[in-house]
Structure formats: C-alpha cells, structure tokens
Image (cartoon, rainbow, N blue to C red):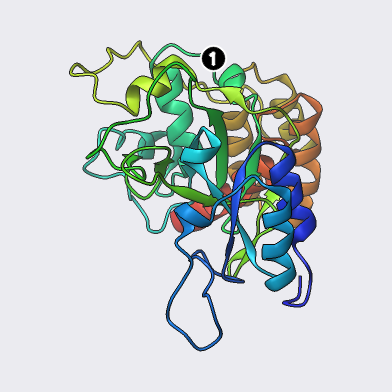
Amino acid sequence: MTSTEHLIPHALRALQRGFWVFPVEPYEKTPHTLNPGEPYTLRWSEAATNDLARVVDYWKRWPNANIGIACKQSGLLVVDCDMPKRAYQLAGTPYAELHDRFGALVDGTDVFRHICESLGQDWAECTQTYRVCTGSMGCHYYYAWPDAMKPPRAPEPSQSSLVKGIVDIRSGGGERGGYVLGAGSVTTKGPYWAENYRPVRPAPPWLVALCRDQGEPFRAAPAFPFRRPGRTGNLSGLIATVESASQGNRNQALLWAARSACADGTPIEEVIEALSAAYTAVDGDGGARQAEQTIRSAYRLQGRKA
C-alpha cells in the first residue's frame, strides 16, 4: 500500500459495523496532526464519531489517514494479542510454564487461549468474533461490552494488561477509554486486515470480570493437557498429525509437526503450504493466518534449539 491510497472505504466499513472512528497519522498509531508542520494533534476522544458526514469530511481532508477505533464510544472491549518481543518474555509471570510447552517464544494468542481454557472456557466459542490481524502479525479480538454494565471505573486504566506486552486490553476505562487501529490501517510493520467478517460477539462474563476490580480472583480450572502428536516422520505423516488432532489440540499439533519438519530440514515455505492447508481443512482456530504464524514460530524455536 502506498501513501497515496485513500483509506475512506475502510473507515466507512468500520462505521457500518457501528464503530466510532477518527483519523490517525499515516503509518503511525498517534492521532492525526491538525495542520502540517504543527505539533498539535486531534483530541481523539472528541474527534471520534459515528456520523457519516464527519467521517467523509475527515478522510477528504486526510485521505491516507489510518483508522482509529474509539473503544469507549463504540462499546468495545478489544483483546490485543501481540507477538513476543524477546525470548522468555513470560519469565517471572504466572504464565512462565508456557515456555515449557511452546519454547522460548510464546505469542499473545497462546497466552490468551491458556487464560481462557484455564478458566474452563471453550476457546473455539470464545474466539468466534470479529478479529483483525495487526501489522506485526498479532491479533485483535473484538467483543461488545455489556450494555447493562458500566465500563471499568477510573482509575482503572483503559489500556490495561492481562499479561503486559503480550495480552493487553483496550476498553472503556478511565475518562476517555482506549483505542485501536482498525482494518485497512498500515504501519511500518505492515497492514491491518480483517481476519473474518463475523459480528462482534458479547464479551464473555469471565473476560469482563478479569477487566474489572472484582475483589477476588477467579479460581482457575485445570488447564487442558498438552498432548504431543501421535505421528511424525515424513511430511505426509506430519500432515496426518495435524488433520487427526482433536479440537483444542490442533495448534499444538501444528507446532510440533512444524518443528519436526524443521529438524528434518524441510524448507519452511513448503511446510507452510502443506501444513496450513491441513490446518484450515480441519477448521483450525485462526485459519491460515494462525497456521503460518505458528509454523514460523516453530522454525524460530527449532532454530534456537539447534
């Protein structure tokens, strides 16, 4: 995408979903400057709107502006699952054990899934909602904040973290709430794009409770056991491993299959093509995007082990 491409179609799609939007600097995450050469930016919480005329006016003035989604005004709770920024980033957190399962690099989606399943929830059901792939290959999971419940109260932050730097929350807390970049936006790390076109599902009660001050923490149910694939060997055997994996174990099976392929010296692009097809054929969570992300993570992990 070039800096001359108009992003108004993406802003209008966000508007059609009921989101309140505002313009963000091209290739950036900061609100748009008011005038060229000036340091002053939009007061984004006041600029955010769901009015068609104002949105058209914004993007006529700044046609290549990124799309900011104001969570408080839009009634959203967005879970921001990021890629790891360094090896063993979960060390010293309650989730350090995940390094034993996934290796040195654990991404936010795997942590979010662990949180979900450790509370006895169905991961597949919880993630059947509108999702946006971020420029860094992370994922934004969109949920609707319950109408009958007030957002997290101040001073609880609108941009809090379930696991700092890996699983962050953007919601309606504090005075103004938080915001995220919408689909169609582009940063220096890459484009943001809608992973599906599902409706935004209501936020699960357990997730709402984690985002509020409940006084007492949840008591976690035992996590689902991690099971290694039953078959390895050549690429056809690894494909069968992914295809035969049970629901709730498919991503782990894909990770182990890809690591095995890496250890066998199979080129990564060949593995992405073969195992991604197997993963999507059995409706693996996150589809082809998640499959490629998992395979590339597996090759990084296996490369570090070698």
The residue labelled by disc 1 is 122
> As drawn, is 185 to the left or to the right of 111?
right
The front one of 130 and 16 is 16
Determine which quarter of the picture holds residue 155: top left
Residue 113 seen anywhere in this rendered image of the structure: yes
Residue 151 rendering spot, x and y as whole percentages: 38, 29
Residue 63 seen anywhere in this rendered image of the structure: no
Height in image: 231 above or below 1? above
Height in image: 220 above or below 94? above
Which amino acid type is marked by label 1?
A: Asp
Residue 200 rendering spot, x and y as whole percentages: 64, 28
> As drawn, is 294 to the left or to the right of 163?
right
The front one of 274 and 168 is 168
Going by the picture, which residue comes out furthest to the bottom? 37
Residue that appears at 27% across and 12% down: 219
Classed neighbour count for the residue bearing mark 1: other residues with Cα under 10 Å, few (<14), some (14–19), many (≥20): few
Residue 283 rendering spot, x and y as whole percentages: 75, 25
The front one of 88 and 194 is 194
Residue that appears at 56% across and 42% down: 140
The front one of 93 and 142 is 142
Residue that appears at 67% across and 56% down: 54
Residue that appears at 61% across and 52% down: 296
Total number of numbered discs in the rendering: 1
Dot 1 falls on a residue whose secondary structure is loop
Q: Which of the image's four quarters has the N terminus?
A: bottom right
Height in image: 177 above or below 24? above
Residue 103 rendering spot, x and y as whole percentages: 42, 44
